[in-house]
Image (cartoon, rainbow, N blue to C red):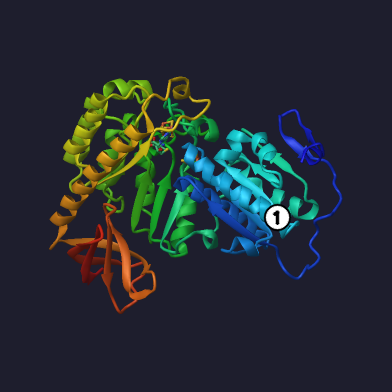
Amino acid sequence: MNNKISQHRILNSGKISRRKTPRLFARQDSMCQPKVFIQTFGCQMNKYDSEVMKSLLLKEGYEFTDNWQEADVILVNTCSVRQHAEERVYAYLWKWSKYKQETKPNLIIGICGCMAQKEGMNILNKIPHLNLVCGTYSIPRIHEFVKDLLKTGGRRIEISEDYTDFPPPVHEARETKISAWVAIMRGCNNYCAYCVVPYVRGREISRSVEEIENEVKELARKGIKEVTFLGQNVNSYNIKNKISKIKNDFALLLKRINDINGIERIRFTTSHPKDMSQATIEAIRDLPKVCEHIHIALQSGSDKILKLMNRKYTREQYKELVEKIRKTIPKVSITTDIMVGFPTETEDDFMDTYNLVKEIEFDASYIFKYSPRPGTKAAEFKDDVPEEIKQERLNKLLSLQKRIVQKQNEELIGKEVEILVGCHILKDKSKYFGKTRNFKPVSFQSDKDLTGKLVRVKITEIRGGLLEGVLASQN
Ligand code: SAH
Ligand code: SF4
Ligand code: F3S
């Protein structure tokens, strides 16, 4: 392995580039395009980046496969947010590396995204047959790296801290034909004490309104009905953007996109409580296409823990924000992220969180056990909450949230809701699935293909936590 690494030289930028190597890996069969398999972990932004990778490779003529054993190129797009996420990726890399050694020596294996950005050279050292480490900033050049590696093999590390603007993914690379993610900004300036994202995604930058508008118009032209704006902190869109001279904000962006014909629904994720402006809350209320759903991470209900986490709001301020949102936007749903077992979290701190969740009654909570991330501020604190206590607190919150959702779902029985019909459920071609405006999943039967249509469904029952209903009318 070290021999191969020595074929690379380190550039001034700290990048390692490959010296000229023999064309050992050139494909013999020029009729058949190399097949690529992409495995994605992590948040929606990573899924979007995988769509970007796929679109860049599609443009170069590569084929795609869902079966990694058929692939000539395996790329894994990774997440570093918790240790467990990283461990899963290492397990895959070991498996593929062994397969390459034993069965398919010309296979190209690459790791992309947040773990690549964070770990860099360490991964090349750990995984013997890995060819490529491609950080988050280098994803727009993935097609160049793949082309080069297919010709020559070898090993390559591409970690930069300089964004060229991300190319929007082509429509063919998007996962569904009804909904599409649209990245409106990247990076994060918040430095929550536990979080690795600012280190792997860099500082906040926003795309211009015009660029986003053009991407959404193109999506609408191709039949997309719903767009979800992505960013680590969408409601600070453009506020801190030093590149654009024009001062825009998130509410204005919502308004501009609301005017695009063909788009029926606009969603966005995620919002930081400290940046949720009155203008944005009112835009959600007033713009007909903007759905009444806000994901706004609480993390903890204890002021002591919030301060240690560097979240920049108090329990009371969070409560006031929720009250303001609910007063302004009728039928809004509010979902959240919560972390248990942050360093020094006592039973009283946890009960502050538990009681706040009980009081607010979120429509959904994504609950995580704290996982120390080397290099973050919190990693300097002792991870002093034992694993079994973290698990116990997680379970308690999960069952509380389940009861809340059950109660909310029961209140919906007999009511009519608007659904954007997304897809069939598994093999049952007459069963459709979609989401309400406020993000509740609903299924119903129909003999007609209603994919992509807005329909009204009357909720009749709850099955396995899912709302089921009957078709009431079609818009
Ligand atoms: N930008 C988003 C969060 C992105 S990370 C926001 O602030 O809303 C998604 C979630 O992962 C976070 O909200 C947090 O609850 C969780 N998370 C982040 N770092 C973590 C860590 N070190 N251990 C456990 N959970 C973590
Ligand atoms: Fe991480 Fe905090 Fe930024 Fe969210 S706001 S990505 S939790 S640092
Ligand atoms: Fe994970 Fe990177 Fe997203 S660390 S949560 S994939 S920004």
Q: Residue at x 48, y 60 (%)?
A: 175
Horizontal and vertical percent position of residue 361: 19, 41
393 displayed left or right of 124: left
125 displayed left or right of 408: right
Quadrant for the C terminus, please: bottom left
Q: Is residue 107 visible?
A: no
The image quarter containing residue 4 is top right
Q: Report which residue position mark 1 lands on.
A: 100
The image quarter containing residue 440 is bottom left
Q: Residue at x 39, y 69 (%)?
A: 426
Quadrant for the N terminus, please: top right
346 displayed left or right of 130: left
Horizontal and vertical percent position of residue 289: 30, 53
Q: Amino acid at mark 1?
A: Lys
SS at mark 1 in the image: helix
The image quarter containing residue 59 is bottom right
